[in-house]
Image: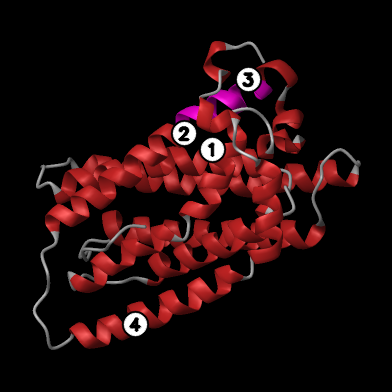
Amino acid sequence: MSVISLQEYEFERVFNEAEAIEWMQDNWRKAFLFSIAYLVLIFWGQHAMKQRPKFELRKPLMLWSLSLALFSIIGAVRTGAYMWYILSTNGLQQSVCDQSFYNGPVSKFWAYAFVLSKAPELGDTIFIVLRKQKLIFLHWYHHVTVLLYSWYSYKDMVAGGGWFMTVNYGVHAVMYSYYAMRAAGMRVPRLLAMLITTTQIGQMVLGCFVNVLVYRWMRQGQCSSYVENIVWSSLMYFSYLLLFCHFFYDAYLRPQRRSLKME
């Protein structure tokens, strides 16, 4: 690939995706252990904080959000360049079905970085618990299911992953930048928060659509996936769609809306 935007940095070039996929095939079930530990910790933490004053943690939260924003911005740029190259040169079907996203130049490193990042992202909830903010179902459900599905799917290099990861990188780039600005005490227009939730809803619609394409082309022998994965992915994206739509109504349309913490 001679496109300048796809020129690899040294750390991307030397990354061994075969070892990464083999490791995930052997260890993906550890995501369940992380999820259980996460749920125990946050709900125990909420109980422990009931009789304690809240922590402000503005500076740590700002640094945390800023680091995830920068990571997501770079990931979105690198995977976006790769996906645009595939889409513009080979078309939509190739961009959905081609497994080269998992082992191609540039994208192979960022695909693995994406799935691994879902474990440390669980740390978002610690700030909610220690600052005694409202912990909604959408927040922890989303964290747990994304972690489980990402690790479960990466090992099989299933079709559609390039779209799922690239769009999520992009949404998180905006979302964590917003969180960083809020933690820094900046006045952020309410319209931006609405826009972020709208893009999250759009992400879920796109995820459902990609699953339809994967299923259709898989039946034609052109997409590498399997029905079980498509079912789990579709249920996950559709449940997110319902929950984010409900969140949007609760946060921005209901007359007596309450302050909620977005995912």
- Specify the segment rendered in magenta: 77-87
Residue 85: give its label.
3
Q: Residue 4's quadrant in the figure?
A: top right
Of residues 161 and 38, the one drawn nearer to the viewer in this rendering = 38
Residue 32 at x, y = what percent?
A: 57, 73
Instruction: Label 1: state its secondary structure.
Output: helix
Residue 166: give its label.
1
Instruction: Label 3: state its secondary structure.
Output: helix
**What is the chief secondary structure element of the magenta stretch?**
helix
- Residue 160 visible? The answer is no
Q: Earlier in the sequence, mark 4 or mark 1?
A: 4
Q: Earlier in the sequence, mark 4 or mark 3?
A: 4
Quarter that holds the C terminus:
bottom left
Residue 77 at x, y = what percent?
A: 46, 28
Against 221, residue 239 (above or below) is: below
**Which residue is denoted by mark 4 in the rendering?**
43
Q: Check if mark 2's residue and mark 1's residue have beta carbons within 8 Å.
A: yes
Q: Is residue 132 left or right of residue 32?
A: left
